[in-house]
């Protein structure tokens, strides 16, 4: 678990962030959001609402046009590339398009973030086996991900994001290709990670994921926050 | 450190499997370049060695009208030594020259039965010091010896020495050119291979960056790849050269000409330098390519 991030500040702090794609497509507009360490937050909204852009801003794939994005107290715009790389080892991301290597098998794909962090090979093997078992994918261990179904690929992508037991896990529509049983398995894994201290931001338009949960959720519409509900009220500003 | 190297080497193996046709082409280019360069270097070094061995036996022979009186010999020796230091100066009388000729003719010495030593000219044999054994200085020395009293002619194998000098010079140029070929071909090929690996791995590198791979994690395997190309290519090139050398010695060993040459393989220090140099060259090529084509 991440040692880079201090306890006394929000893990993710977005202040008046705007992202405009050329020529003038406004993806998110002047939004602010703070996510506390250990929180599980749902980011909801229709397709095109700006959820994916917001996640990309948090993991420094995109830079905001205006505003500040802080992760673990670091302003990402002022953070050097070496530190960003180190930061990414502590952030697990489930991409909407999975970003798997089709010629590598499921185990090799899941192991990748751990190899990048130079973990011990036995530790890597054991963690890969554990995640495959949780997601009921053990029998697909040695199969190239290019030959797996979309739902299976999604589960491999989720396992890869969870592999390093990251401090922050960002998931973009993590159950978009899954049946209800698989979606439940994924939610169980997310909750287990959350209990172990991982902060999660889950972008989803699948209402069944958060309908009966106590977790805070914020809704995006046309790049703006329109609604939020939470038993644990945290600063959420829409200016 | 050990763990990091393990992951880097694992990536190197992965790259070799993924991109093996290009890797093989690059390896063959390095091997061939090393083979061509070391082949000419081997010939050059052997020729230089032969030249040095022949140089030890180099002498200038001054043929005289009449024999030099023993009393005058120290005077003439001293005159020669004032111009150039000599290892040895021998005064050869007609009789001594005749005995030598008899020895050289061995079984055919009967030819000389009715002849006396009178038909042979007396001579002075001058064995110059090593510093005087280059072609220009020998020519000057020869011109000086021709001015000695009673000197008819001075001989030192001018024509042969001149040709040998030109041949050695030509070989030196070929070695330098093949060395340049080695540098250019190896550097270029390794650099291109790394470039192709980067292109082939573009999507993989993007994902590696997204999961937090450091520049070192991404670049180190490519750098090791260059080093490996250098070590393998140069070792393979030198092994081939050694095989050619052994084959030549075995199959052409009976030839009188080659037997006289007493040629040897490259010394260990030279082979180590070729392997080390090629490896450095390949490492440099890969580093150049990494810096040029990978913006992280």
Image (cartoon, coloured by chain):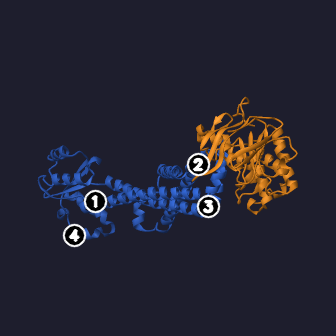
Chain colours: A orange, B blue
Where residue A99 sits: x, y (%)? 70, 55
Where residue A175 sits: x, y (%)? 80, 53
Where residue A36 sits: x, y (%)? 75, 35
Left or right of B163? Residue A98 is right
Residue annotated with mark 1: B161
Residue B19's mark? 3
What is the chain letter for disc 1? B
Residue annotated with mark 4: B114
Left or right of B219? Residue B267 is left
Report whether mark 1 lies on the same chain as mark 4. Answer: yes
Q: Mark 3 and mark 1 in contact (Cβ < 8 Å)?
A: no
**Is residue B2 something one can see in this rendering?**
no
The alpha-carbon separation of the residues under discs 1 and 4 comes to 36 Å
The alpha-carbon separation of the residues under discs 1 and 2 comes to 54 Å
Report whether mark 1 lies on the same chain as mark 3. Answer: yes
Where residue A164 sits: x, y (%)? 75, 43
Q: Residues within 10 Å of mark 3 (few under 14, many from 20)?
A: some
Q: Residues within 10 Å of mark 4 (few under 14, many from 20)?
A: few
Tell me the SS state at disc 2: helix
The alpha-carbon separation of the residues under discs 1 and 3 comes to 53 Å
Q: Along the polypeptide, which appears first: circle 1 or circle 4?
A: 4
Q: How crowded is mark 1: few (under 14 residues within 10 Å), some or many (20 or more)?
A: some
Left or right of B203? Residue A114 is right
Tell me the SS state at disc 3: loop
Q: Along the polypeptide, which appears first: circle 3 or circle 2?
A: 3
Q: Along the polypeptide, which appears first: circle 2 or circle 4?
A: 4
């Amino acid at each position: 678990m991440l040692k880079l991030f201090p306890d006394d500040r929000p893990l993710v702090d977005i202040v008046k962030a705007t992202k405009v794609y050329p020529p003038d497509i406004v993806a998110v507009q002047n939004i602010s959001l703070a996510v506390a360490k250990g929180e599980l937050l749902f980011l909801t909204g229709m397709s095109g609402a700006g959820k994916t852009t917001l996640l990309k801003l948090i993991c420094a794939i995109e830079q905001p046009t205006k505003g500040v994005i802080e992760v673990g107290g670091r302003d990402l715009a002022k953070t050097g590339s070496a530190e960003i790389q180190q930061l990414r080892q502590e952030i697990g991301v489930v991409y909407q398009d999975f970003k798997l290597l089709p010629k590598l098998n499921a185990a090799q794909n899941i192991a990748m973030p751990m190899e990048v962090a130079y973990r011990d090979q036995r530790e890597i093997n054991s963690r890969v086996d554990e995640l495959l078992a949780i997601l009921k994918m053990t029998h697909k261990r040695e199969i190239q991900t290019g030959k797996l179904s979309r739902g299976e690929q999604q589960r491999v992508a989720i396992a890869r994001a969870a592999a390093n037991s990251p401090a922050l896990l960002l998931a973009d529509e993590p159950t978009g290709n899954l049946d209800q049983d698989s979606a439940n398995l994924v939610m169980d894994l997310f909750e287990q990670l959350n209990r172990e201290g991982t902060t999660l931001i889950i972008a989803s338009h699948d209402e069944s994921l958060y309908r009966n949960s106590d977790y805070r959720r914020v809704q995006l519409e046309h790049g703006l926050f329109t609604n939020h509900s939470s038993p644990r009220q945290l600063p959420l500003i829409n200016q | 450190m050990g763990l990091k190297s393990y992951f880097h080497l694992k990536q190197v193996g992965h790259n070799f499997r993924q991109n093996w046709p290009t890797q093989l082409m690059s390896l063959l280019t390095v091997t061939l370049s090393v083979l061509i360069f070391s082949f000419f270097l081997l010939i050059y070094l052997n020729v230089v060695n032969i030249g040095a061995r022949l140089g030890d036996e180099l002498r200038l022979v001054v043929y005289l009208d009449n024999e030099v009186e023993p009393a005058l010999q120290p005077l003439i020796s001293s005159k020669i030594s004032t111009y150039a230091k000599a290892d040895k100066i021998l005064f050869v009388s007609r009789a001594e020259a005749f005995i030598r000729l008899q020895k050289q003719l061995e079984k055919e010495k009967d030819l000389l039965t009715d002849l006396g030593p009178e038909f042979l000219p007396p001579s002075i044999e001058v064995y110059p010091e090593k510093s005087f054994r280059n072609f220009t200085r020998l020519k000057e020395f020869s011109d000086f010896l021709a001015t000695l009293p009673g000197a008819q002619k001075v001989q030192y194998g001018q024509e042969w020495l001149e040709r040998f000098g030109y041949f050695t010079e030509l070989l030196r140029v070929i070695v330098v050119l093949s060395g340049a070929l080695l540098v250019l071909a190896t550097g270029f090929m390794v650099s291109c291979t790394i470039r192709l690996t980067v292109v082939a791995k573009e999507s993989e590198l993007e994902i590696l960056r997204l999961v937090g791979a450091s520049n070192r994690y991404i670049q180190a395997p490519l750098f090791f790849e260059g080093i490996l190309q250098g070590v393998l290519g140069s070792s393979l090139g030198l092994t081939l050269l050694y095989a050619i050398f052994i084959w030549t010695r075995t199959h052409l060993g009976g030839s009188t000409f080659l037997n006289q040459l007493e040629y040897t393989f490259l010394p260990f220090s030279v082979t180590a330098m070729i392997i080390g140099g090629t490896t450095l060259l390949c490492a440099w090529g890969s580093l150049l390519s990494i810096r040029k084509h990978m913006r992280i």
